[in-house]
Image (cartoon, rainbow, N blue to C red):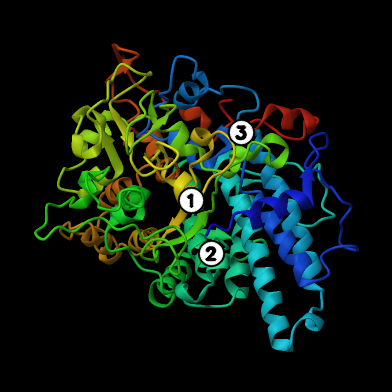
Amino acid sequence: MKKLLYIMAVGVMIMVTSCSDLLDTDNLYNKNLDSFYRTPTDINEAMNGVYNALFVSGVHSNEHLAANLLSDVMLGGGGPDDVSAKNVDQFQDPSEDTYRDLWVETYNGVSRANAIIEATTDGDFSAYFDTAEEAEVFKNNTLGEAYFMRGFLMYRAARFFGGMPIIATSESDRSAPRASLAETWAFIASDFKNAAETLPEMSADAYALSDYGHANVWVAKSYIARAYLYYTGYMTNIEGQATDVLPLTDGGSISKSEVISLLEDVINNSGYQLASDFRNLWPYSYVNESARTYNADGNNPVLPWAENPDNADPAVPLAWVGQDGPNATLGTGNYEVMFALRYGLGNWNYDNGTGQKFNNRVPLFFGIRDHSMVPFGQGWGWGTVHSDFYAQWSDDDPRKEGSVLNLNSKDSNMGLADWNIGKGDQNTGLVNKKYTTLQHDGPDGVRGMFYYLYDMSNGDPMQLWAAQDFYYLRFADVLLMHSELTGTADGMNQVRARAGLEAETYSLEAIKAERLHEFAFEGLRWFDLVRWGDVETGNNFYNDQITVNNSGVEAPYQVSYRTETKGLVPIPESELRLSNGVYEQNPGW
């Protein structure tokens, strides 16, 4: 059902990282361009190794978790000992290598992608296919995917670190200095452009279930738009160097009109579309059905609210679209999620004892602290939701109740009757509902929903059973990016209509509000604040003083964003030392 092992086991088997040399990677079995990368099987295994670099061991290197803690809608939370989360929330570096795994895995993946690009560009694979055309399709798809993933890994890192060393080939100097912002983003944009021009065009439902989670041409075109918006916004609003083009490595550039054309191609031709109900994107919409497997008569659903959330007559229950794409065997079919990080049930023994990274730790870390309820289970209590953000969100927007779990309500229809606020720090009684622990009763007692869905049989269930994918890109973002770039309301109002909300006239402020509510807790808010410059202007919740509960004691709390950091996190100190002075630390750190 899940296609994780192709990423995990093969990728780990092929390559490992050497921590002793700057930006260096060693091949565990001495596989190189001469002895490996010769057959389609070799290439496919190597590509799995590229995707393996998406998984990081250090929790603060997890893009989703880190970006949420940096944003203005989540607090550090946790317990008294969870100092690192609180420090990140306050823009203090918890340790000298807080984000090192993100840096290291970036270059693991880049090195693997480089090897694939070099071997495939000059490779002849015709002997492995019935026709020359099939061999050419394989070659183009491989090159396009390798270019995209190399660009994506750099994109992921550059939004956190800024300028990055560019390692464009397997022979590149590993001691290269950090490139400028323009050079870094030109490298990223060129890779996305190569991917968009090389990958074959297929409708969303034509991709095999076994390929779901891999990048495709529509994802590449959409990420050109994301790169354009971030780079032009950052340079204009943070660096004070106004620009309206995304540079390329050959000296050219991508214009706004070109980006708009790419998005319109995705909208009109990709086959992706919005799910009919926003709430059906999230696993809580399936927890009743999963629980009924062991309670077939359907009495006493574990989440009564989900049986008829809009009080319709007749009742209209939530129905999960699943997380395996349009051709999913579980759920009704997901046409909205275009690119996702595919998690599975973890095992402590995978990858030299770092196997927890292969399951989604965000539901664990952001789950309700010290309360194991049904269907919302226990977690570490990080990432409590800012109460002013919650208060400004209209109750008429169903995404509010679909995104935030209001523990203060003690609503029995949500399974919250036994909740008590006197647990954990910076507690607001509000937690995110999209990525949180879900559980119900079954043959092994109360266990995680994914524990039962995927027949978990190993390890510590509570800390390893969150097999919920992280959505990198939804079609809703394509629509909202198109509205932002064109200054028109069409895409924005399609997203609003899906939520049952009235159409609005376009304005940048309307787009900002729409993105805030549509993508809450999905790891986008922080980067939006940075690119708009709102992280520095006060158009945020950072300076709002609110009342929180610290293990039973109420106290005032507010975040003080430090403008001198320029929206970046620190370069890992160990990498600075390894560079022997070649790298410079980011401002403010």
SS of the residue at dot 1?
A: loop
Residue 60 falls in image quadrant: top right
Residue 396 higher or lower than 59, as above or below: below
Q: Position of residue 171 (x, y in %)?
A: 85, 55
Q: Amino acid at mark 1?
A: Asp
Q: Position of residue 426 (x, y in %)?
A: 35, 20
Q: Amino acid at mark 2?
A: Tyr
Q: Amino acid at mark 3?
A: Gly
Residue 366 higher or lower than 148, as above or below: above
Q: Position of residue 245 (x, y in %)?
A: 51, 60
Q: Give the side of residue 220 with respect to residue 273, left or right.
A: right
Residue 433 higher or lower than 268, as above or below: above
Numbered tag placed on residue 58 in the rendering: 3
Residue 371 visible, this orientation: yes
**Which mark sits nearer the N-terminus, 2 or 1?**
2
Foreground pick, 297 / 479: 297
Q: Which residue is mark 1?
A: 469
Residue 226 higher or lower than 100, as above or below: below
Q: Which residue is mark 2?
A: 212
Q: Give the side of residue 575 with respect to residue 61, left or right.
A: right
Residue pictured at 49% horizontal, 26% vertical: 88
Q: Give the class, few, some or many, for how many residues have Cα within 10 Å of label 3's Cα (few <14, many ≥20).
A: some
Q: Give the class, few, some or many, for how many residues have Cα within 10 Å of label 1's Cα (few <14, many ≥20).
A: many
Foreground pick, 473 / 155: 473
How far is mark 3 from mark 2, CA to CA? 26 Å
